[in-house]
């Protein structure tokens, strides 16, 4: 398989060749954990992948508890299905996401209970960020030997906020009503790491390996491990064990890629329509940087990635590859979407026409009340 074949396999699984016809919860599972630190990007990613999508379907599934939003892989906010959340949470925990310390001071055994007690406290009712410092200070007063004094002093400088960087918590909205505003309260997950029904680390890794390949395969061990936030030596034995029983190994140059045997791998020559992706789209981050060329050309790396704030900008796919970034705004009732092609990218007349057509559809979805809509190109 060459990069084009890998590209088409990825697009097929992501619903970017043929839109997915399925309920939103099933789509979220099929396309992998959705990176979601920029909340408005989530509807864009789903809209681009689904044959029919309305934001109320997303918010309804969240309200029904069918989807979960919180700290997950690599310590980053993700949206996953509720039934798959526990495995992702354990993998994040295995990767050190739940280590809240800011110093190298060892954590006494008694200190490990702080995280468990925090989750139990958040299970009583959703908590605001401002609530965590009083909780932590009360807990520390009751367990004075549990946290190194230097660590406690460091935590006070940031009001104990690192405690909320926890895969055992989920985010929920104030008032309980899901919508376009970013959820800010923290509640206990239904099955946090370490709880009675949480999967073991090995079982969770195995399951999340399958989920990566389901959404982004074929992929190498380094790709899978990087996406999970684990070291390759931790993941490799599990991938090799799965390969012996249920995965297919594919030689691509000097690399061995792995895949689910029944996963789609369409003809590399199948046409790929123009698609718009949101900020931090998971598809761009599913592989280690040196192996992202199947979707994100190296020449456009700095066009998309803003190093100063670690942002992945919203992108436009042309013939299946990242070709441009985009932004939109509404002024005086007119919604404008601006497309900025990457360095060296020359969009032909037909490609520009397709970009405008898809961009206008996106503007209708994002700004239905706008009185006018326009797609423009900028250098």
Image (cartoon, rainbow, N blue to C red):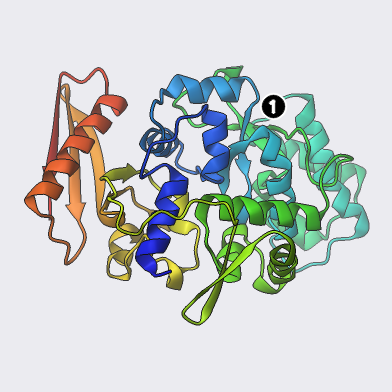
Compared to residue 199, the image places residue 234 above or below, namely below
In the figure, residue 284 lies in which quadrant? bottom left
* Image side of residue 223 versus residue 107, left or right: left
Secondary structure state at the residue bearing disc 1 = loop
Q: Is residue 216 above or below residue 44?
A: below
| Residue at the spot 74% in from the left edge and 62% down from the top edge | 245
The one of 282 and 268 positioned closer to us in this rendering: 268
Q: Is residue 366 left or right of residue 103?
A: left
Q: Position of residue 132 (x, y in %)?
A: 71, 38
Q: Is residue 44 left or right of residue 167?
A: left
Percent position of residue 158, x then y: 63, 50
**Horizontal and vertical percent for residue 181?**
46, 27
* Residue 123 visible in the shown view: yes
Examine the rendering and report whether any part of residue 93 can be seen.
no
Q: Which residue is mark 1?
A: 126
Q: Residue furthest left?
A: 349
On the rendered structure, is 123 left or right of 109? Answer: left
Residue at the (84%, 40%) spot, across then down: 117
Q: Which residue is at a point 19% across and 47% down the rendered structure image?
A: 339
Q: How many marks?
A: 1
Using the image as rendered, state which of residue 112 and residue 202 is in the foreground. Answer: 202
């Amino acid at each position: 398989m060459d990069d084009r074949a890998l590209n088409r396999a990825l697009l097929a699984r992501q619903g970017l060749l043929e839109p997915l016809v399925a309920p939103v919860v099933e789509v979220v599972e099929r396309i992998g954990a959705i990176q979601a630190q920029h909340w408005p990007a989530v509807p864009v990613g789903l809209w681009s992948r689904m044959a029919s999508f309305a934001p109320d379907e997303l918010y309804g599934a969240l309200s029904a508890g069918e989807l979960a939003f919180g700290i997950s892989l690599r310590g980053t906010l993700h949206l996953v299905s509720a039934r798959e959340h526990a495995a992702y949470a354990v993998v994040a925990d295995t990767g050190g996401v739940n280590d809240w310390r800011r110093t190298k001071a060892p954590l006494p055994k008694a200190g490990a209970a702080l995280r468990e007690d925090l989750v139990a406290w958040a299970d009583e009712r959703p908590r605001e960020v401002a609530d965590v410092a009083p909780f932590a200070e009360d807990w520390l007063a009751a367990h004075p030997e549990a946290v190194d004094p230097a660590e406690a002093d460091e935590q006070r400088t940031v009001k104990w906020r690192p405690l909320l960087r926890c895969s055992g918590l989920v985010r929920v909205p104030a008032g309980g009503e899901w919508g376009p505003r970013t959820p800010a309260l923290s509640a206990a997950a239904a099955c946090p790491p370490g709880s009675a029904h949480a999967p073991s680390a090995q079982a969770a890794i195995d399951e999340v390996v399958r989920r990566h390949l389901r959404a982004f395969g074929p992929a190498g061990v380094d790709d899978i491990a990087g996406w999970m936030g684990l070291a390759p030596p931790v993941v490799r034995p599990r991938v090799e064990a799965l390969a012996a029983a249920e995965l297919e190994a594919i030689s691509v140059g000097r690399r061995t890629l792995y895949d689910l045997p029944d996963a789609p791998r369409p003809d590399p020559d199948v046409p790929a329509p123009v698609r718009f992706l949101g900020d931090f789209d998971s598809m761009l981050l599913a592989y280690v940087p040196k192996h992202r060329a199947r979707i994100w050309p190296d020449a456009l790396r700095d066009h998309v990635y803003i190093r100063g704030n670690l942002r992945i900008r919203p992108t436009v796919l042309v013939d299946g590859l990242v070709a441009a970034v985009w932004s939109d705004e509404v002024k005086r009732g007119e919604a404008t979407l601006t497309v900025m092609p990457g360095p060296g990218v020359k969009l032909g007349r037909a490609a520009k026409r397709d970009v405008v057509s898809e961009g206008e559809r996106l503007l209708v979805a994002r700004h239905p009340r706008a009185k006018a809509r326009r797609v423009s190109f900028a250098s």
